[in-house]
Amino acid sequence: MTFSGLRVVKEALTGHKGWKPLWRNPEPKPSYDVVVVGGGGHGLATAYTLAATYGITNVAVLEKGWLGSGNIGRNTTIIRSNYLLPGNQPFYEFSMKLWERQEQDLNFNSMVSQRGIINLFHTDGQRDAYRRRGNAMHLSGADGRLLTREELREKVPFLNFDNARFPIKGGLMQSRAGTARHDGVAWGYARAADMRGVDIIQNCEVTGFRMEGGRVTGVETTRGTIGAGKVGVAVAGSSSRVMAMAGMRLPIESHVLQAFVSEGLKPTIPGVVTFGAGHFYVSQSDKGGLVFGGDLDGYNSYAQRGGLPTVEDVIEGGMALMPMIGRARLLRSWGGIMDMSMDGSPIIDRTHIDGLYFNGGWCYGGFKATPASGYAFAHLLATDTPHETARAYRFDRFTRGHVIDEKGVGAQPNLH
Ligand SMILES: Cc1cc2nc3c(=O)[nH]c(=O)nc-3n(C[C@H](O)[C@H](O)[C@H](O)COP(=O)(O)OP(=O)(O)OC[C@H]3O[C@@H](n4cnc5c(N)ncnc54)[C@H](O)[C@@H]3O)c2cc1C
């Protein structure tokens, strides 16, 4: 079933009786060429790319809950490619380019909206750092420019420009950045993968790996054993737990990150704005809610909910940046489990076990990476070589010392 304007008109005139479920609900087959563990954004994008780009369609995505129950349906929807380091920036710019054509590729409205992101700076040193970051962005073909205080006053007049402690001096803007509807992205990939023959199997938890002679031959699941030529694990916040079943200990800790949504307001915020003197960022959804967040809760956890001290901390950041937020009522908040790596950057790599591949360590930046992560992981699964934009995302960078520490805070996952 394809979507088009004509189709919408036809269904409207015929009582909407022709719409079908977006994907099938198949029983698992005894075996597949590739089994992808985890039906989040990255797992689904991987399965889609395996089928659409590499012609590998005998693929299953095994999801322990329902599609969208993980971080893909819990994030604050920001997409951007404004990184600094050479290991990261080309990858995220590749992802941005895939976002720009995603709705056409998937024939699905994932509400990609390039409304821009502004990273505010409050000191001269911070301005220099953002100038450097902007230059790095240009080197990978991304857009970015510094905004003066006066330009900012025009775009976002409601900010507290003259805050005595954190005066706003300017910002780094990427116009092509923006937001996308997070669960819509999962549905779009699921539908497009299913249409190409991929089996998406929900309520199917992987509970172990089958190995023979140092090679993975399948997975144990709550719905029985499923054989596999190759297994790709993309389970985000559950990475350490799942890979422990294969005897691997990862350079990853799991932490909680919370998100917040206010009541619906008239259009106020033109794009995404991030505070440079604390951890607070905000955008406005198409329904009018202010969508915002800040720091991790700061302790290891596998709970999909957070604690009140972080709520207070995030709201304090919001009040310092835009005091008017104090008049909005908070409607909802929730948490997601972040797979925080030791250097804040992801891993897309083979493991020491033949046929077992890993994708994770996305920290709180994996939503924007979804299209490129799926592409690079599918490339690795299909060709056994890393995709050119993901060459730096190897396990051995931690033993070689070639870490990709975007924030420069060292091996402390909760600080990245
Ligand atoms: C509050 C919050 C805000 C965020 N904001 C942003 C943002 O603005 N921009 C951005 O780029 N990123 C953001 N992120 C990060 C981003 O959401 C994640 O990095 C990304 O979604 C992780 O990849 P995923 O979609 O594949 O994960 P998930 O959706 O979590 O997918 C993993 C799946 O694996 C499944 N699974 C786990 N164990 C098993 C098992 N044993 N068997 C089978 N299935 C299993 C889980 O149920 C889950 O569905 C945010 C995250 C949170 C929580």
Image: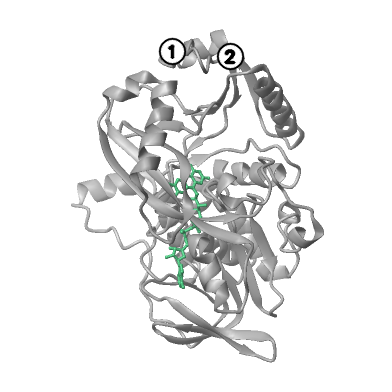
In the orientation shown, which residue stands out farthest toward the right? 400
In the orientation shown, which residue stands out farthest toward the top? 150
Q: Secondary structure at mark 2?
A: loop
Mark identifier at residue 148: none
* Residue pictured at 41% horizontal, 35% vertical: 313
Q: Is residue 327 visible?
A: yes
Question: How far from the left and from the top, in percent, is residue 83?
Answer: 66, 38
Residue topped by disc 2: 169
Q: Quadrant of residue 246?
A: bottom right
Question: How far from the left and from the top, in percent, is residue 335?
Answer: 38, 50
* 179 left or right, relative to 149: left
Mark 1 to mark 2 CA distance (whole Å): 13 Å
Residue topped by disc 1: 157
Task: Check the picture and name the quadrant holding the C terminus.
Answer: top right
Q: Is residue 108 visible?
A: no
Q: Is the residue marked by circle 2 packed among few (<14), some (14-19), or many (20+) residues within 10 Å?
A: some
- Residue type indicated by callout 1: Pro
In the orientation shown, which residue stands out farthest toward the bottom? 213
Q: Quadrant of residue 139?
A: top right
- Residue type indicated by callout 2: Lys
Question: How far from the left and from the top, in percent, is residue 229?
Answer: 62, 82
